[in-house]
Image: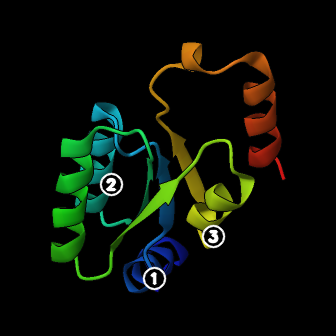
């Protein structure tokens, strides 16, 4: 069996796990759906002030995806809540809606989290 075929077969057994932060935005929710279609396991990190309708849709999707989708409620200013959502993930898609809502110190703090 060729190496590329073996890698594909291994990924089908253990698909990569990625995190979408903030999945409670329109872009984040669309990304969650696309990643699930492509076979990824997804950690959907929703913020406490996220779009309520999208959070409900993610909850419904979580019940139908047989363990491939897990929803986490995170506070973007709480390091530990973000780490919990990132646990076991090999990738992060950051869909925070508006950096204007956060000051520069927050963005530096978030950058520190990503690189640790």
Give the number of the mark in front: 3 or 1. 3
The residue where tag 2 is placed is 35
Question: Residue at horizontal 20%, vertical 54%?
Answer: 56
Quadrant of the rendered image containing residue 13? bottom left
Q: CA distance from mark 2 to mark 1?
A: 15 Å
Mark 2 burial class by Cα count in 10 Å: few <14, some 14-19, many 20+: some
Viewer-proximal residue among 74 and 115 = 74
Where residue 105 sits: x, y (%)? Answer: 81, 24
The correct choice, above or below, for 69 with respect to 107 in the image is below
Mark 3 burial class by Cα count in 10 Å: few <14, some 14-19, many 20+: few
Q: CA distance from mark 3 to mark 2?
A: 18 Å
The residue where tag 1 is placed is 14
Where residue 114 sits: x, y (%)? Answer: 74, 46
The correct choice, above or below, for 76 with respect to 55 in the image is above
Question: Residue at horizontal 71%, vertical 18%?
Answer: 103
> For the residue labelled by badge 1, is the local secondary structure a helix, a strand or a loop?
loop
Q: Give the residue furthest to the front.
A: 49
* Residue 4 in the figure: left or right of residue 64: right
The numbered dot on residue 87 is 3
């Amino acid at each position: 069996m060729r190496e590329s075929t073996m890698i594909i077969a291994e990924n089908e057994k253990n698909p990569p796990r990625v995190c979408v932060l903030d999945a409670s935005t329109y872009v984040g929710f669309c990304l969650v759906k696309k990643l699930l279609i492509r076979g990824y396991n997804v950690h959907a990190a929703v913020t406490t002030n996220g779009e309520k309708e999208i959070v409900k849709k993610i909850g419904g999707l979580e019940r139908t995806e047989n363990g491939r989708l897990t929803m986490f409620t995170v506070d973007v200013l709480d390091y530990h809540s973000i780490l919990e959502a990132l646990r076991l993930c090999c990738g992060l898609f950051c869909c925070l809606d508006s950096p204007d809502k956060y000051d520069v110190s927050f963005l530096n703090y978030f950058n520190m989290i990503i690189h640790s």
